[in-house]
Amino acid sequence: MSWYLLFLAGLFEIGWAIGLEYSDGLTEPLPTLGTVVAIVVSFVLLAQAIKNLPVGTAYAVWTGIGAVGTATLGIVLFDEPATLTRIAFLGVIVVGIVGLHLTSGGH
Protein backbone atom coordinates (compact mmCIF):
# COMPACT_ATOMS: atom_id res chain seq x y z
CA MET A 1 0.00 0.00 0.00
CA SER A 2 2.87 2.40 0.79
CA TRP A 3 4.32 2.01 -2.71
CA TYR A 4 0.90 2.76 -4.18
CA LEU A 5 0.64 5.91 -2.03
CA LEU A 6 4.15 6.91 -3.06
CA PHE A 7 3.29 6.43 -6.73
CA LEU A 8 0.18 8.61 -6.33
CA ALA A 9 2.25 11.21 -4.50
CA GLY A 10 4.62 11.27 -7.47
CA LEU A 11 1.72 11.77 -9.87
CA PHE A 12 0.49 14.72 -7.82
CA GLU A 13 4.03 16.09 -7.84
CA ILE A 14 3.89 16.05 -11.64
CA GLY A 15 0.54 17.83 -11.39
CA TRP A 16 1.82 20.67 -9.27
CA ALA A 17 4.99 21.09 -11.30
CA ILE A 18 2.98 21.38 -14.52
CA GLY A 19 0.48 23.56 -12.66
CA LEU A 20 3.24 26.05 -11.97
CA GLU A 21 3.64 26.58 -15.70
CA TYR A 22 -0.08 27.13 -16.20
CA SER A 23 -0.36 29.38 -13.15
CA ASP A 24 1.89 31.98 -14.81
CA GLY A 25 3.97 32.66 -11.71
CA LEU A 26 1.00 31.96 -9.41
CA THR A 27 -0.92 34.87 -10.94
CA GLU A 28 -3.73 32.85 -12.56
CA PRO A 29 -6.26 31.94 -9.83
CA LEU A 30 -7.60 28.55 -11.00
CA PRO A 31 -4.26 27.04 -12.04
CA THR A 32 -2.74 28.39 -8.83
CA LEU A 33 -5.48 26.76 -6.75
CA GLY A 34 -4.96 23.47 -8.58
CA THR A 35 -1.23 23.73 -8.02
CA VAL A 36 -1.63 24.34 -4.30
CA VAL A 37 -4.10 21.46 -3.94
CA ALA A 38 -1.74 19.14 -5.82
CA ILE A 39 1.18 20.20 -3.58
CA VAL A 40 -0.80 19.46 -0.43
CA VAL A 41 -2.07 16.11 -1.69
CA SER A 42 1.40 15.13 -2.87
CA PHE A 43 2.97 15.94 0.50
CA VAL A 44 0.24 14.18 2.48
CA LEU A 45 0.59 11.03 0.38
CA LEU A 46 4.38 11.16 0.68
CA ALA A 47 4.10 11.54 4.45
CA GLN A 48 1.81 8.51 4.61
CA ALA A 49 4.17 6.43 2.46
CA ILE A 50 7.15 7.34 4.64
CA LYS A 51 5.44 5.70 7.61
CA ASN A 52 6.37 2.32 6.11
CA LEU A 53 9.18 3.09 3.66
CA PRO A 54 12.70 4.37 4.27
CA VAL A 55 12.64 8.15 3.92
CA GLY A 56 15.61 8.28 1.56
CA THR A 57 14.13 5.69 -0.77
CA ALA A 58 10.68 7.26 -0.69
CA TYR A 59 12.01 10.76 -1.33
CA ALA A 60 14.23 9.62 -4.21
CA VAL A 61 11.37 7.70 -5.84
CA TRP A 62 8.93 10.59 -5.31
CA THR A 63 11.25 13.12 -6.90
CA GLY A 64 12.19 10.68 -9.66
CA ILE A 65 8.57 10.11 -10.63
CA GLY A 66 8.03 13.86 -10.56
CA ALA A 67 11.13 14.58 -12.62
CA VAL A 68 10.43 11.98 -15.31
CA GLY A 69 6.74 12.83 -15.54
CA THR A 70 7.29 16.57 -15.60
CA ALA A 71 10.08 16.38 -18.18
CA THR A 72 7.96 14.08 -20.35
CA LEU A 73 4.95 16.38 -20.17
CA GLY A 74 7.24 19.33 -20.84
CA ILE A 75 8.16 17.66 -24.11
CA VAL A 76 4.54 16.86 -24.97
CA LEU A 77 2.79 20.02 -23.77
CA PHE A 78 5.41 22.77 -24.00
CA ASP A 79 7.55 21.71 -26.96
CA GLU A 80 10.64 21.22 -24.80
CA PRO A 81 13.52 19.44 -26.54
CA ALA A 82 13.12 15.68 -27.02
CA THR A 83 16.71 14.80 -27.83
CA LEU A 84 17.93 11.24 -27.68
CA THR A 85 20.34 12.18 -24.90
CA ARG A 86 17.60 13.77 -22.81
CA ILE A 87 15.32 10.76 -23.22
CA ALA A 88 18.21 8.43 -22.35
CA PHE A 89 18.87 10.29 -19.11
CA LEU A 90 15.19 10.17 -18.22
CA GLY A 91 15.49 6.42 -18.75
CA VAL A 92 18.37 6.35 -16.28
CA ILE A 93 16.11 7.97 -13.69
CA VAL A 94 13.44 5.32 -14.35
CA VAL A 95 16.05 2.59 -13.87
CA GLY A 96 16.99 4.22 -10.57
CA ILE A 97 13.37 4.31 -9.42
CA VAL A 98 12.87 0.64 -10.28
CA GLY A 99 16.18 -0.27 -8.67
CA LEU A 100 15.25 1.49 -5.44
CA HIS A 101 11.92 -0.30 -5.39
CA LEU A 102 13.53 -3.70 -5.98
CA THR A 103 16.21 -3.18 -3.33
CA SER A 104 14.04 -1.60 -0.66
CA GLY A 105 14.69 -4.53 1.67
CA GLY A 106 11.12 -5.79 1.91
CA HIS A 107 9.66 -2.48 3.05
Image: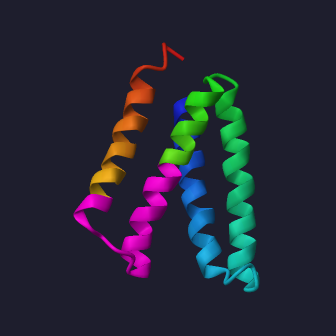
In the rendered image, residue 54, in percent from the top left (x then y), is placed at 62, 23
**What residue span does the magenta drawing correspond to?**
65-86
In the rendered image, residue 70, in percent from the top left (x then y), is placed at 48, 62
Foreground of the two, 9 or 76: 76
Q: Report the magenta stretch's main SS.
A: helix
Check residue 84 for magenta coloring.
yes
In the rendered image, residue 79, in percent from the top left (x then y), is placed at 38, 81
Foreground of the two, 102 or 90: 90
How many circles with numbers are drawn on the protein?
0
Quadrant where the image shows the N terminus: top right
- Residue at (31%, 48%) from the top-left corner? 91
Quadrant where the image shows the C terminus: top right
Foreground of the two, 67 or 43: 67
Q: Is residue 10 left or right of residue 42?
A: left
With respect to residue 84, does 50 lie above or below? above
What is the quadrant of residue 77 in the picture?
Answer: bottom left
With respect to residue 78, does 35 lie above or below? above
